[in-house]
Image: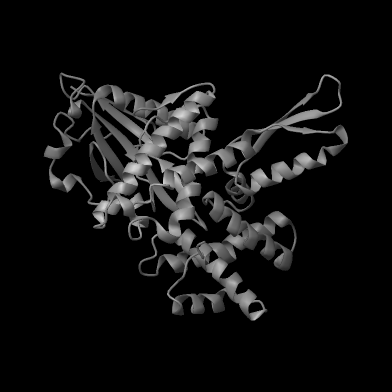
């Protein structure tokens, strides 16, 4: 009898035939969805209106995958949510079908191949670079050595003008109190090799050859990683009367979406200068504030865009308290627009569509040098083919 463990708040999945490989399960148990490349068998299952991914793999990597993902989710690092694990499905724990990992399906997500343009990522390249570098920095800040960072081990989701990268595979990962520079460098080397291989596969799949592959993508991710890591972890040495300079550092981190949990301050032995370093928490600065103010749940850069609209509404429509005006924004503005956008054909993520509409309204207002209502912008947005964010 297989050993099934499921986290609280989820179905028990006891009625699934765990004693056989998922490749032999009846087709009616699965939902057919696009999926990326995986070294293991992966199927999608719907239960009580929610989607789950079931991955079949040997026992040891399954257990590691489950435990690391649980910890990362607790730390609010972008990773798929582990729901349960099934061990002992075969007598040999090293067999491919000896275990299964159940994770919650990530809504509105897609594989890297959905962003491919020609033999690379074209106009999406900058978004890919920032997404990868940001995810690696977040993992390393929490002491997570990934061990197998690649294009295929990540899901992607549009987050306003950015792309959000979500860790999928933690089979080879390990958690430490703090990573050494050597461990971080090793992870970056693995990333570069795997990303180069992924870009070569893209070029070949498009009928090109190695000369057409964007083999520099990994190098560019490394450069952005180092720049972001420096911003997140470096120590500022300032005069005691220049403490205001550190406020600018905190504001830059907030603009990138990072919370500053606390600031470490150490005086030089001669007291002539202060050494100040931010202790960075999760990348949810704007999403936390939006949720606190309105109850709206959105991704980090979506939240930054929506907060700008909330603040404008409060400034122009406030009657009573700021909190009451923010609640009116959700009831009178946000919820009706999201409902309306959800009814449109081909709108996958209505909150992302709302952010697209807001930035379109801003661009049109700027072009005509006068304010455009959301309703007027909506009509033009539809006529223009529902454009998204302008890409660099």
**Image point 61% across, 45% down: which residue?**
285
Residue 139 % position (x, y):
49, 34
Q: How far across and how far down the image is residue 357, in percent?
A: 52, 68
Report which quarter residue 148 is drawn in. top left
29 vs 310, left or right, is left
- Please indicate, yes or no, whether residue 317 appears anywhere in the rendered image: yes
Residue at the farthest front position: 211
Count of numbered circles in the view: 0
Residue 280, quarter of the rendered image? top right
- The colour scheme used to paint the residues is one colour
Q: Is residue 193 left or right of residue 289?
A: left
Q: Residue at x 23, y 33 (%)?
A: 56
Residue 187 placement (x, y as % from top left): 44, 31
For residue 21, side relative to residue 13 (left or right): left
Quarter holding the N terminus?
top left
Give the side of residue 11 with respect to residue 187, left or right: left
Nearer to me, 291 or 73? 73
- Would residue 77 be seen by someone viewing this image from the given angle? no
**Is 111 rendered above or below residue 344?**
above
Residue 185 in the image, given as x and y percentages of width and height: 48, 30
């Amino acid at each position: 009898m297989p050993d099934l463990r499921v986290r609280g708040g989820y179905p028990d999945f006891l009625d699934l035939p765990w004693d056989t490989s998922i490749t032999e399960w009846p087709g009616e148990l699965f939902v057919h969805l696009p999926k990326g490349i995986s070294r293991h068998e992966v199927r999608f299952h719907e239960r009580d209106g929610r989607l789950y991914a079931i991955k079949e793999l040997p026992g040891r990597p399954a257990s590691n995958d489950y435990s690391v993902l649980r910890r990362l989710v607790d730390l609010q690092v972008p990773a798929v949510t582990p729901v349960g694990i099934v061990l002992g499905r075969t007598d040999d724990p090293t067999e491919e079908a000896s275990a299964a990992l159940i994770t919650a399906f990530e809504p509105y997500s897609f594989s890297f191949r959905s962003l491919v343009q020609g033999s690379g990522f074209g106009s999406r390249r900058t978004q890919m670079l920032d997404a990868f570098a940001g995810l690696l920095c977040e993992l390393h800040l929490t002491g997570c050595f990934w061990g197998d960072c690649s294009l295929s081990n990540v899901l992607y989701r549009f987050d306003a003008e950015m792309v959000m990268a979500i860790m999928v595979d933690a089979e080879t990962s390990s958690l430490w109190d703090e990573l050494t520079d050597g461990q971080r460098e090793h992870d970056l080397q693995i990333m570069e090799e795997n990303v180069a291989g992924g870009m070569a596969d893209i070029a070949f799949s498009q009928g090109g050859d190695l000369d057409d592959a964007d083999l520099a993508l990994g190098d560019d991710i490394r450069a952005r990683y180092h720049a972001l890591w420096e911003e997140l972890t470096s120590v500022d040495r300032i005069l005691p009367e220049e403490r205001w300079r550190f406020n600018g550092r905190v504001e830059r981190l907030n603009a990138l979406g990072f919370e500053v949990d606390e600031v470490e301050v150490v005086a030089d032995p001669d007291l002539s200068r202060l050494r100040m370093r931010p202790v960075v928490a999760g990348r949810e600065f704007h999403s936390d504030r939006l949720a606190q103010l309105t109850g709206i749940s959105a991704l980090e850069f979506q939240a930054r865009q929506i907060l700008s609209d909330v603040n404008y509404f409060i400034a122009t429509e406030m009657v009573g308290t700021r909190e009451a005006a923010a609640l009116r924004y959700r009831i009178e503005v946000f919820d009706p627009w999201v409902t309306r956008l959800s009814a449109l054909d081909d709108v996958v993520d209505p909150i992302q569509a709302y952010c697209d509409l807001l930035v379109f309204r801003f661009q049109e207002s700027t072009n005509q040098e006068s304010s455009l209502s959301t309703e007027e912008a909506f009509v033009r947005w539809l006529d223009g083919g529902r454009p998204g964010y302008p890409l660099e």
